[in-house]
Structure formats: structure tokens, C-alpha cells
Amino acid sequence: MTTEFTADSALRAMAKSSQTGRTSPIRDAAFDAVRHLMGAALPKGADAVLAAMGEAQALAEDLWRQVRATPAYALGTRPAACGKGCGWCCHQRVGATAIEVLYIADALRKRPDAAPLLDRLEAWNGGRPCVFLVDNACAIYDLRPFKCRGLYQVDARWCMSTYAKLDVPWFGPAPSHDYLMPPKDVFDGAVFGLAQPFHVAGRDCPGVDFIPALKAVIRQPDAVQRWWRGDAVFPAEVRLHDWFPPVKGKTGKTVKKRR
């Protein structure tokens, strides 16, 4: 995966049939950029990795900005129904990588408005919508996981019926499940770019259920250092076992995951 991101590569990616099975140049660009960023930080320790996570967010957002600026996107992409005040997608479980959760926890604790948000998180009992959906807007929008960033639906009624389990108006066409592929490519590529260096190094960076995982570490300022040492900072039940392949050590043997 070494395709350089350019406006031309974005045009080719958007013109491809989704049935070709090929990897998108946009996804490749996000994967490569984040992989190199995190790979360079990994030998420097936990603090460097945490800082690189923030840089990865900015990098992926910049790639997404570049995609949106291309004529191919502006002229060839249907408008999304998403916007502030439309929080229907926030009624579902969200996955995130372990390093995303640890970074968000660290950044959230430092925010001046942290206290009410931490109270909301600690009071969360497993229900939906997302605990950070406040007045139909994301209260941690600048920190939200990559999976949240990549979801752009073209029909809000589909999100209402699928995620919020609401009845949609009976008149008109059926709700459309169509979504925008370019942002999904950017942020999915970034997710795998985050995890790949850890897996190559034999370090455990699992996919986790975002809200319960965040709740587990939010009051643990030393969680990053403990995780770096190999401690199990996330409960076993929040791990998403279908996200990434088993972690391999340098010997090629599967590393036993701590619970």
C-alpha cells in the first residue's frame, strides 16, 4: 500500500466500481501516512505514541479535506444528510482502537469542560444513544473516534430507522442505505494504519467498544503507561475480536492476550 494521494488518484478511486475488489488510493494514502507516523513513534515509548495519535487525527482530517476539495468529489458525489443536530448515527455501538481510546481519555481529562462530561460517562449504564450526544450534537466532536468521522449517509431516515429504531414516514421512497465511500476510505485506512505497527511489533492494540472502554480508563491517568507495560487496562468484554488478526510476536508465534 504505497499509493500517493493526489487529486487524480482521488478521481480514479471514486470512478472505480465497488465490485472490483481493489483497494482505494484514498484508503491507501490514509493507511500509509498514519502507519508511518505511528511506526516512527513506536520505538520512542508511550508518550510519543500518545502524541502521534493526536497527529494522526490531524493528518487524517487533512486528507479528508483534500478529498473534499477535488472536483471529483464536488461534482461526482451525492450530498450527505449529516450535520449538526442530526444525531441518529449516535444511537449505535462504535468501535475504536485501544490507542484512540487512551488518547481521547487523556485529552478529555484535560478539557476545561471535562467535569460534566466525565459525570455523564460514569453514569452511563449501557444504553443508547451515545453518552456524548448533548442537544443532538457531539460534545467531543474534535476528539471523536475515526469510525465516527467516516460515516456519511445520504438519507437521514435510514439512520433514524436503523440506529435509533424509529418509524420513518410511510410516504415517499424507501429509506436509502447509500453512504459516501471517500470519507469511509480515509478513516478506515487510518484505523488500520494505527493498528498495523503495533501488531508488527507484537504489541496488543485491539479494537474495543468505545464507550465502555473509555469508561474503564477515564479515571486512570496512568492507563497509557500500564497498557504500554502490557497490563490489561480494558475489560475482556469490551474487546472486538473480529477487528484485527491475532497479534504476532517477533518469533512469528501468536502472543497470548492478557485479560
Image (cartoon, rainbow, N blue to C red):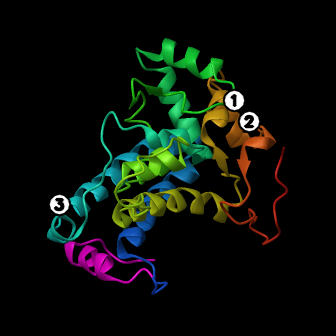
- Circle nearer the N terminus (3, 1): 3
User: Who comes first in sequence, dot 1 or dot 2?
Assistant: 1
Using the rendered view, name the quadrant where residue 78 is placed.
bottom left
* Magenta segment includes 120: no
Mark 2 vs 3, N-terminal side:
3
Work out whether 68 lies above or below 232: below
Q: Is residue 24 above or below residue 140?
A: below
| Element class at badge 2 | loop
Q: Amino acid at mark 3?
A: Ala
Q: Nearer the viewer, residue 171 or 55?
A: 171
Q: Amino acid at mark 1?
A: Ala
In the picture of the structure, the residue carrying the numbered disc 3 is: 69
Chain part drawn in magenta:
1-18
| Image quadrant in which the C terminus is located | top right
Q: Residue at x 58, y 36 (%)?
A: 102
Q: Foreground residue, 46 or 123?
A: 123
> Residue 233, labelled with which disc?
2
Q: Mark on residue 216?
A: 1
In the picture, the disc for residue 68 is: none
